[in-house]
């Protein structure tokens, strides 16, 4: 197994030269954290199906939660290149670690910042940034995944608040969350609600038996006549576009994150092929092996350039959701292919937890599916270029 200290990110087109000193410093700090705190023990936690909860305060101390938000709300005000590099390094460790950070930042802190009142921002965001509170995001339902607009979770107005009923499924962090950003229909219109842990009628049982994202907490959220006070409605939320805006933030992080996964698989396969001797020479000397390595470095380089330009568009306010769909769709697909190729290159050793390949290969199955499947992003792009919505 390669030492984490020997890892060097693939940079075939000199992208490092385009990064600022601050961006590189942030990336390297998170890389060192992953090398020291995640990689040495992640296989153990993956086998036990446990999340590394001890990482949460350390991640908060590094400013990983909500780092693009203004300092007055607990963020660092960094740009989206730096944020993407954070996601890349976290997912090199494990998709579950990046998922935790993505949810806390993009799916909990972002909607509170974007749709919340000033009182809600001041109450929750600094605590979420410091990990004094953990959040989750409830949109997907047992019968409504790719079609979130079909949700049946409902809120009804009552004196002083709302009565919430329904269920959500496949919720990262749900069981440990102190607060849930929950989307429900109020008079037929989708609205966001902040549901705090301990609310009567609210439960979050953990999902068991996963063969993917095993080192991540996945839960169901159940609401049975939950009373949600008036002040816990996100006043700026209005219609399905609000949760979809949150998903755009999460998809952006995924597009960057899976580059880290692909990079780790490539690096492991390259080092293995140089040291594995068959027929009297390293397997790296064989043409088929070199073809696979050439594919990997080409697709990773393309993914890096996609994300770098996407970050520039985001920072300039010009990024469109469809552009995020393109990056999420492409990068997840190539990461899945690279993980599969790497497993083949390691032969029987590829299935051992001595190497990270099989864990990453299992994880990418989930990452490719959540926050919009490959097929849904295909149709989003199809509609964008033709003007015809094929899924309606």
Image (tube, grey):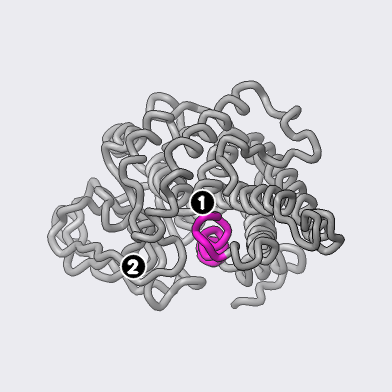
Looking at the picture, tell me which residue is in the foreground, 360 or 3.
3
Q: Taken as a whole, is the magenta stretch helix, strand or loop? A: helix
Query: Is residue 354 magenta-colored?
Result: yes
User: Which residue appears farthest toward the front when viewing the image?
Assistant: 280
Helix, strand or loop under label 1:
helix
Q: Position of residue 366 (x, y in %)?
A: 51, 65
Where does label 2 land, which residue? 168
Q: Quadrant of the C terminus?
A: bottom right
Residue 319, by quadrant, is top right
Reply above or below: 78 against 224: above
- Disc 2 packing (10 Å; few <14; some 14–19; many ≥20): many
Q: CA distance from mark 2 to mark 1?
A: 18 Å
Question: Is residue 240 in sight in this rendering?
Answer: yes
Query: Could you say where residue 250 lies in the image, as x and y percent from the top left?
Result: 51, 51
Label placed on residue 358: none
Circle 2/circle 1 CB separation < 8 Å = no
The range drawn in magenta is 351-370
Instruction: Work out whether residue 8 or residue 167 is closer to the camera in this orientation and state it.
Output: 8
Vertical relation: 13 (above or below) 369: above
Which residue is the site of mark 1?
Answer: 250
* Observer-nearest of 272 and 57: 272
Point out the tag, 2 or 1, that comes first from the N-terminus.
2
Q: Secondary structure at mark 2?
A: strand
């Amino acid at each position: 197994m390669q030492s984490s200290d020997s890892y060097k990110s693939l940079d075939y087109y000199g992208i490092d030269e385009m990064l600022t000193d601050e961006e590189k410093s942030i990336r390297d700090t998170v890389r060192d954290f992953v090398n020291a705190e995640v990689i040495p023990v992640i296989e153990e936690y993956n086998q036990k199906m446990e999340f590394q909860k001890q990482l949460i305060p350390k991640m908060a101390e590094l400013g990983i939660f909500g780092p693009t938000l203004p300092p007055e709300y607990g963020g660092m005000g960094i740009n989206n290149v730096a944020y993407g590099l954070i996601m890349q390094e976290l997912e090199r460790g494990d998709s579950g670690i990046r998922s935790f950070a993505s949810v806390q930042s993009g799916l909990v802190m972002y909607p509170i910042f974007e749709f919340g009142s000033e009182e809600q921002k001041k109450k929750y965001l600094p605590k979420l940034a410091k990990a004094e509170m953990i959040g989750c995001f409830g949109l997907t339902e047992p019968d409504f995944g790719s079609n979130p607009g079909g949700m049946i979770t409902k809120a009804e107005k009552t004196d002083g608040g709302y009565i919430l009923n329904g269920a959500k499924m496949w919720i990262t962090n749900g069981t440990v969350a102190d607060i849930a950003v929950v989307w429900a229909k109020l008079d037929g219109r989708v609205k966001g609600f902040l549901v705090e842990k301990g609310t009567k009628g609210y439960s979050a049982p953990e999902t068991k038996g996963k063969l993917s994202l095993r080192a991540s907490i996945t839960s169901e959220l159940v609401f049975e006549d939950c009373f949600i006070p008036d002040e816990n409605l996100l006043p700026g939320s209005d219609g399905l576009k609000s949760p979809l805006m949150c998903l755009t933030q999460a998809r952006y992080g995924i597009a960057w994150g899976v580059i880290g996964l692909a990079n780790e698989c490539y690096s492991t396969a390259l080092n293995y092929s140089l040291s594995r001797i068959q027929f009297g020479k390293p397997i790296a000397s064989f043409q088929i092996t070199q073809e696979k390595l050439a594919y990997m470095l080409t697709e990773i380089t393309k993914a890096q350039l996609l994300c770098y330009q996407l970050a520039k568009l985001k920072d300039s306010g010009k990024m469109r959701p469809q552009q995020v769909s393109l990056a999420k769709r492409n990068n997840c697909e190539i990461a899945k292919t690279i993980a599969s190729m790497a497993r083949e290159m390691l032969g029987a050793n590829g299935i051992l937890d001595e190497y990270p390949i099989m864990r990453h290969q299992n994880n990418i199955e989930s990452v490719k599916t959540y926050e919009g499947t490959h097929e849904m992003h295909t149709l989003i792009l199809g509609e964008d270029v033709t003007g015809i919505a094929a899924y309606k």
